[in-house]
Amino acid sequence: MRYWRVLFRNLATWLSAEMAYREDFLAAVLTALITTAGRVFALWGMFTAGVDFGGWRFEEALLVVGAAVVLMGAFAGLVEPNLSAFSRRVFQGTLDFVFLKPLDTQFLIMFERVSLWGLPDLVAGTWLIVAAAQRLGLSLAAVLALLGGLGCAALLFYLLAFGAALVAVRSMYVSNLLHFLAAFLQAAQYPATAYGRGFRWIFTFFVPVYWMTQVPVEVVLGRVSGALFLALGFWLALALAASRLALRLAMRSYTSASS
């Protein structure tokens, strides 16, 4: 309960701060609408141009696009602000303030802030999923299962990004690493069958965005076995263990401001 209280207090504090910039939020909403519409038109253009999606229908591919947009919203709303703040703490040598708090260090680093700028993408992606699901005749339970799988996928992506941000202990260019991961996430907004074999291998094993955007959709559509959700859970557990180990190793090289 103590962790939940700290989490909600942090979120409420930063949401109140974000509400001071309402014009910027309206601009973010407009940008999200235009960008989402562009993704849908681009997908439709590829289908009308005869691009081979390996048997995927337009509505099914639209589910993958919606899943990717949801994860992009999670990245903009939670991942980027927290890891950028972590990088600044390392640069300023003020990470000691986090170490002194009587809670888990990784929890405090990962869930210190939240940004409203990711909310428009979350809503737009969810709307795409619901609209495509209605046209495909999917049940509400299937939609909820898909959104639950995307929640696990968002946490997996966050843990991968957190591991990349630990490089901030030795390098200050964490923003480049975050842009690198975000670019992979954007590339995974279409079914993997639209890419060559080499790209599919990269999306599956090197940066496993395939497991984040397409696997939950394929499970809901019945294309693959639901046991792949267990594989997603394996990736999640592996990423969590690796991130905690990487944090311990990185903190050995950390130099505080007082030092």
Image: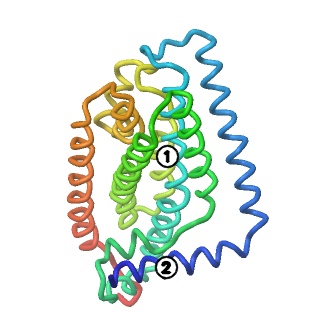
Secondary structure at badge 2 equals helix
Q: Nearer the viewer, residue 116 or 248?
A: 116
Quadrant of the image occupied by residue 210: top left
Residue drawn at point x = 25 percent, y = 47 percent:
235
* Residue that mark 2 sits on: 10
Percent across and percent down for residue 105 are 31, 77
> Mark 2: which amino acid?
Asn
Residue drawn at point x = 41 percent, y = 20 percent:
193
Distance Cα–Cα, label 1 vs label 2: 25 Å
> Could you classify mark 1 by the number of other residues whose Cα lies within 10 Å: few (under 14), some (14-19), or many (20 or more)?
some
Q: Quadrant of the C terminus?
A: bottom left
Q: Is residue 160 shown left or right of residue 136?
A: left
> Could you classify mark 2 by the number of other residues whose Cα lies within 10 Å: few (under 14), some (14-19), or many (20 or more)?
some
For marks 1 and 2, the one nearer the N-term is: 2
Q: Is residue 230 shown left or right of residue 99?
A: left
In the depicted structure, whether residue 140 falls above or below residue 198: below
* Residue that mark 1 sits on: 182
> Mark 1: which amino acid?
Ala
Residue drawn at point x = 47 percent, y = 60 percent:
79
In the depicted structure, whether residue 116 falls above or below residue 90: above
Percent across and percent down for residue 142 are 40, 40
User: What is the number of the mark on residue 216?
Assistant: none
Considering every residue shown, the one lying at the far right of the view is 23
